[in-house]
């Protein structure tokens, strides 16, 4: 199938997609330019020189570190649908709504300039139906910036498209990943990561063991949620960049199949009236090599830019 090279275009928010069974990454990529490439009804790649994202037709995403001509990834998307989850999903009345079918006809990217500089924003939209027949629209906005080759910024907006029925959102995940250390360090147990919480260098890292389970609530602990996991091959950090009084629960635990589940969840319930919508907090994903020092410094830099802009 021919690849569609999408350069600048649609400002429309009816868009997008991510994949668990897609073929191997392309052998080569541009060295610096931010690019969007999509296969009709297949993979969608949004790429910078270091962080590269691959979406499939149900908006599942694999995050890659591109280095020395190779792609590395430590997040796992299992073939078992009972275990697989996209990065952003919701629950309606306790029922998880995960698989949003991408609107391929309207995939697009727009040029942007914010406090993080010049970049491009990918727009993806997908639709899912609850067991009661209500169609939910999900719009995923993904930002890459010229001067931040290791970072991706994401938020999701959900809309109740029903013209009569209200729905109750009982859970919302703003970044969910299943991590597998064997992808970055062959021969290691799947849970064998180093992990760092918070953006202060003085907080020592921990080693994840088979019984590991820990959570962090921003409103109770008064800090931004930031978690970094890494192996000898690569690291991946997730941080909250929402402004104002954010409310995030960051949780990390080893699953029964010995993978590591990382979840940034928005607590509480929310009623969406007909045509009502809500957006998740803005989250940043960072890829790196080495320990948490580089990712923590980058995260602090991003927060400084946000604070500076708020004070202008």
Image (cartoon, helix red, strand yellow):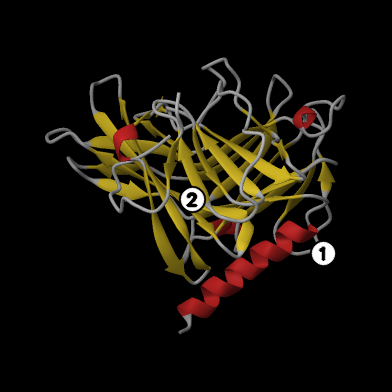
- Taking the spot 24% from the left edge, 38% from the top edge, the residue there is 160
Q: Between label 2 and label 1, give the one nearer the viewer.
A: 2
- Taking the spot 39% from the left edge, 28% from the top edge, the residue there is 40
Outermost bottom residue: 312
Determine which residue is flagged by label 2: 154
Q: Position of residue 230 (x, y in %)?
A: 78, 43
Label 1 sits on a secondary structure element that is loop
For this view, does 271 lie left or right of residue 80? Answer: left
Residue 301 in sight in this render: yes
Of the 4 image quadrants, the one containing the N terminus is: top left
Using the image as rendered, state which of residue 64 and residue 203 is in the foreground: 64
- Taking the spot 25% from the left edge, 21% from the top edge, the residue there is 132
Of the 4 image quadrants, the one containing the C terminus is: bottom left
Q: Quadrant of residue 182?
A: top right
Using the image as rendered, state which of residue 158 and residue 13 is in the foreground: 13
Q: Is residue 112 above or below residue 171?
A: below
Q: Position of residue 128 (x, y in %)?
A: 32, 27
Q: Position of residue 263 (x, y in %)?
A: 58, 40
Q: Is residue 293 above or below residue 268?
A: below
Outermost front residue: 2
């Amino acid at each position: 199938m021919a690849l569609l090279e999408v350069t600048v275009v649609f400002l429309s928010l009816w868009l997008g997609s991510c994949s668990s069974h897609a073929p191997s990454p392309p052998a080569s990529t541009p060295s610096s330019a931010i690019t969007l490439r999509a296969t009709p009804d297949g993979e969608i790649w949004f790429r910078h020189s270091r962080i590269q994202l691959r979406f499939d037709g149900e908006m599942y995403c694999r995050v890659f570190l591109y280095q020395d001509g190779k792609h590395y990834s430590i997040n796992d998307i299992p073939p078992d649908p009972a275990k697989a989850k996209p990065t952003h999903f919701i629950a309606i009345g306790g029922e998880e709504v995960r698989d949003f079918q991408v609107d391929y006809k309207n995939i697009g990217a727009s040029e942007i300039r914010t406090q993080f500089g010049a970049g491009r924003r990918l727009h993806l939209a997908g639709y899912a139906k609850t067991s009661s027949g209500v169609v939910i629209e999900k719009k995923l906005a993904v930002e890459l910036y010229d001067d931040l080759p290791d970072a991706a910024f994401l938020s999701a907006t959900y809309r109740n498209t029903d013209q009569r029925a209200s729905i109750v959102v009982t859970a919302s995940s703003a970044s969910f990943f299943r991590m597998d250390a064997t992808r970055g360090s062959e021969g290691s147990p799947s849970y064998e990561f180093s992990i760092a919480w918070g953006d202060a260098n003085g907080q020592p890292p921990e080693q994840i063991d088979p019984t590991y389970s820990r959570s962090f609530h921003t409103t109770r602990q008064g800090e931004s949620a930031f978690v970094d996991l890494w192996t000898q091959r690569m690291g991946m950090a997730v941080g909250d960049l929402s402004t104002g009084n954010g409310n995030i629960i960051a949780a990390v635990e080893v699953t029964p199949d010995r993978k590591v589940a990382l979840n940034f969840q928005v607590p509480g319930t929310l009623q969406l009236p007909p045509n009502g919508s809500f957006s998740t907090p803005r989250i940043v994903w960072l890829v790196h090599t080495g320990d948490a020092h580089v990712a923590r410094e980058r995260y602090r830099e991003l927060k400084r830019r946000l604070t500076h802009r708020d004070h202008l």
